[in-house]
Amino acid sequence: MKTLLLTIPSVIAIGFFMSAAHAGDLTVTISDIREARGSLMVALVNSDAAWKNEAAPVAAKKIPAAQGEVKLEFKDLAPGSYAVQVMHDENENNQIDTNFLGIPTEGYGFSNNPNVMRKAHYDEARFEVGADAATITIRLR
Amino acid sequence: MQRRSFTQGLLLGAIAAAAKPGFLRAEVLAPTGPERFAAGLAREPWLAGWKSFDAEAFGPTQATIEGSWPGGLTGTLYRNGPARFERGALRYQHWFDGDGLMQAWRFRGGEITHSGRMIATEKFVHEQKVGRFDVRAAGTTIPDALPIRNNDSMNTANTSVVRLGNRVFALWEGGSAYEIDPDSLAARGPTTWRNDLVAAPFSAHPLLERDGSAWNFGSLDFFGTTGLIIWRIGADGALVRTAMLEAQDPGYLHSFAMTDKYLVFTFMPYRMAEDKGSFFERLQFTQDRPCRIALVPKDALDAPRWFEAPFAAIYHFADAYEHRGEVVVRAARHADIEEARAPMAAAMLGERGSPSSNTELVSLRLDLARNRARWETHGVGGFEFPTFDARTPGNQPALLFAPASVHPANAPFFNAISSIDTRANRVSVHHYGADVLAEEHLFVPRPGASKPGDGWLVGTVLDFGRGRSGVTVLDAMRVKDGPLATAWVPYTMPLGFHGWFAAG
């Protein structure tokens, strides 16, 4: 039986990978956070391989959850294509919980907020960062 | 009434109603507004059955009793159904989309009260807050719908209600059962039967064993796979176990049937259209392919036997029994698969359209020795929402009870209650009136009686001629005599789908 399991990378193990030249800053607003408990695990990637957890992300952050909305920044990004995925690890077990079918039972979200009932594809979540500051909002579902 | 006249009265009457002007095919894709429905309601007062209920709760209202309510008939008739159909300029196009409204008719101390409360699902609570429909729906495309977490995010808990142990649940078919406070009707939230089963589908049609324990299923087709989860719930309302039934191909099923030994799941073949849209907009039944039927021994859930029979469009299976090497399952088969895909679609738009009653009674006969399946017809049609006395011995057909359509009728919906005895080849009908809509009638055993069929029918009606809703009680053995009593409230409520009677 095929499952719909999300493969959000374990950001704690991966840590930060910062870029230097021709930098731009990205502000990510995460909205619709249902509960204050647990952590938000946010991964910024710039390739399909990294989106699929087959390569390292550009950056990853773990921040405490807060009800409603939080903001975070990724600084000094090189211009190019990026995508962000967020998971709300409500029970702090370092993974997104799923049921027997692989359906997520904790909050998650993707850049561009694609309206799909599965993990978004990289192309659906991809956006451009130029030389200037960029801002996106990801709605947790 | 004999079978021939019944058929003429019901089935032909339904067809005649369908042929009236204003017939509209159920293929309107663009959202349509409340204004069109309101204009339709002004022309066609029977559309009150599909009017949006826009409050959060009502009652209790004291009902006025006509006739003599049986002293032994005490308890609560819970009724569930879609009710919130409109927000802002958007009106759902599919009857199955409305948010669930739980109603309670309470029969106590010679008095009857009526109350109701919208089921506070995640979807309903969110949309109450934002003031618009922005969660995807089963049968309507919602403009700019929000991305959702999982299937329970769109759970409307709007189809049926069951009491398992002392727990009352509002049921949908694509997600969790919502537990409901039996007294206040307040939602206690989606039920997690076991940690790995969060949001697992729990169909709207569980079946009870004689000891109060239950079986149910959940279709996995909603998740891009095939097959079922089978649920076994104890008489105390707690999970006993689950099992998986794998199926090769996509197959839709809304309900199932069971005998003493077997569960019977009938899968209707379909494919999903490639274009975007809601589940029921994309659903295309494939009539050129057979139904596949899984006969699952209750004591060996991992050992199904598979049968094939010609395509049939069925929502509701009734009783099942074993006789002379056959398992026989009875059901209401729909002749019009477009109507089956979107029942009362024209009414949802505010139009008079094809009736829900273009059905006939069929028996699915599974020959266990030859491993063959076939459909048998009975020449009885024009009904839906069949019920029966579950105490009927497992080797014989039960007396069936079902709302039916008879002439004269001023609405393309059921306006009568019938009892169908296929062994005696006899049908009895009580016609409530041309201006009445009749809903499901449940069988309630008479206290102290053990003979199958000895009890009452308790059902709800909407009298659009006089702008009132009511609950009726009939002697199940004397349906044609009409109600022993009816309790009326001076307002109409949207029609529901299924109910549950909790004695006490």
Image (cartoon, coloured by chain):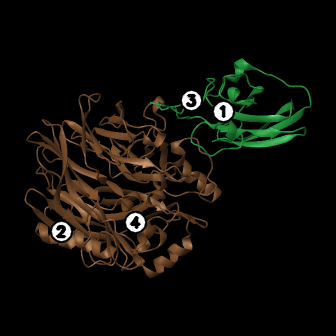
Chain colours: A green, B brown
Labels 2 and 3 in the same subunit: no
In the image, is residue B82 above or below residue A108? below
**In the rendered image, which residue does mark 1 sit on?**
A87
| Residue B344, disc | 4
The answer to whether the residue labelled 4 contacts the one labelled 3, judged by CB atoms less than 8 Å apart, is no
> In percent of the image, x 35 and y 38: which residue is there?
B237
**In the rendered image, which residue does mark 3 sit on?**
A97
Q: CA distance from mark 4 to mark 3?
A: 40 Å
Labels 1 and 2 in the same subunit: no
Q: How many marks?
A: 4
Q: Chain of mark 1?
A: A
Q: Chain of mark 2?
A: B
Labels 4 and 1 in the same subunit: no
In the image, is residue B68 above or below residue B302? below
Residue A108 at what x, y percent from top left? 64, 36
> In percent of the image, x 54 and y 52: which residue is there?
B275
Left or right placement of residue A35 versus residue B235 in this view: right
Can residue B203 be seen here? The reply is yes
Q: CA distance from mark 4 to mark 1?
A: 41 Å
Labels 2 and 4 in the same subunit: yes
> Farthest bottom residue?
B43
Q: Residues within 10 Å of mark 4 (few under 14, many from 20)?
A: many
> In percent of the image, x 51 and y 78: which residue is there?
B39
Secondary structure at badge 2 equals: helix
| Residue B7, disc | 2
Q: Amino acid at mark 2?
A: Thr
From the viewer's side, name the closer residue of B233 and B63.
B233
Q: Amino acid at mark 4?
A: Met
Task: Look at discs 4 and 3 and give the one toward the viewer.
Answer: 4
Residue B234 at what x, y percent from top left? 31, 34
The answer to whether the residue labelled 2 contacts the one labelled 4, judged by CB atoms less than 8 Å apart, is no
